[in-house]
């Protein structure tokens, strides 16, 4: 059980680190240095950039978990591992694929991690929209 807890901590840390790195990149790429560019710029383009960046970061995080599942022989192929990881990370949880009993504790941990990362993404999106609205008023 200790080994599985260490693996879970490692996966959570990698996932959070990926998300934080994505945020740092978003700050440089999307957030302008001054509010003038928000008023005269193209906010729809900034919002679309953020959406695509967030989707890319989430897919990368799902892929990290899927790689672990695949290389731990939890699933027979990469497609199944990615599908399971995606449905678990997003808390959809279809239930048509299940982790082996020895690894089943990772399902809820990935789901909780995914919910937290989606919450962070939603807050970044909200922050940008708030900044755009504030700059235009």
Image (cartoon, rainbow, N blue to C red):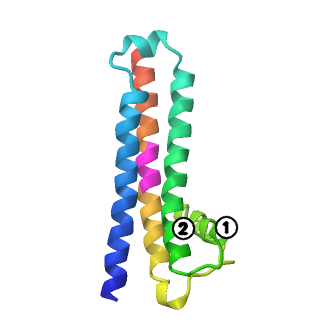
Give the SS element for disc 2.
helix
The N terminus appears in which quarter of the rendering? bottom left
Q: Residue at 45% across / 46% down in the picture?
A: 121
Against 107, residue 115 (above or below) is above
Task: Between residue 60 and residue 122, name the one nearer to us.
Answer: 60
Rendered location of residue 77, percent (x, y): 65, 73
In the picture shown, does residue 93 fall above or below 26? below
- Secondary structure at badge 1 equals helix
**Crowd band around label 2 with a 10 angstrom C-alpha radius: few (<14), some (14–19), many (20+):** many
For label 2, the residue is 66
Question: Residue 16 got which mark?
Answer: none
Q: Is residue 137 visible?
A: no
Question: Image quadrant for the C terminus?
Answer: top left
Q: Residue at x 66, y 71 (%)?
A: 80
Q: Can residue 134 be seen in this view?
A: yes
Q: Which of marks 1 and 2 is nearer the N terminus?
A: 2
Residue 90, percent from left and from top: 55, 61
Q: What stretch is highlighted in magenta?
A: 117-122
Instruction: Name which quarter of the figure residue 9 lies in.
Output: bottom left
- Residue 66 colored magenta? no
Q: Please indicate whether residue 120 sits to the left or right of residue 107 in the image.
A: left
Residue in the image at 44% along x and 16% along y: 38
In the image, what residue occupies the spot 53% across and 60% down?
63
Pinpoint residue 134: horizontal percent, then vertical percent.
Answer: 39, 20
Q: In this view, does 103 lie above or below 69?
A: below
State whether residue 101 is above or below residue 120.
below
Image coordinates of residue 31 in percent, x first then y, are 39, 26
Q: Mark 1 points at which residue?
A: 79
């Amino acid at each position: 059980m200790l080994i599985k807890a260490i693996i879970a901590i490692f996966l959570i840390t990698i996932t959070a680190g990926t998300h934080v790195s994505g945020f740092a990149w978003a700050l440089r790429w999307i957030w302008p240095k001054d509010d003038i560019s928000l008023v005269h710029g193209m906010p729809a383009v900034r919002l679309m950039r953020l959406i695509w960046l967030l989707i890319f970061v989430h897919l990368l995080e799902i892929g990290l978990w899927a790689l672990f599942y695949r290389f731990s022989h939890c699933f027979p192929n990469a497609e199944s591992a990615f599908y399971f990881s995606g449905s678990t990370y997003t808390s959809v949880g279809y239930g048509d694929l299940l982790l082996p009993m020895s690894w089943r504790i990772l399902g809820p941990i990935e789901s909780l991690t995914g919910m937290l990362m989606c919450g962070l993404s939603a807050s970044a999106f909200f922050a940008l929209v708030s900044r755009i609205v504030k700059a235009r008023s």
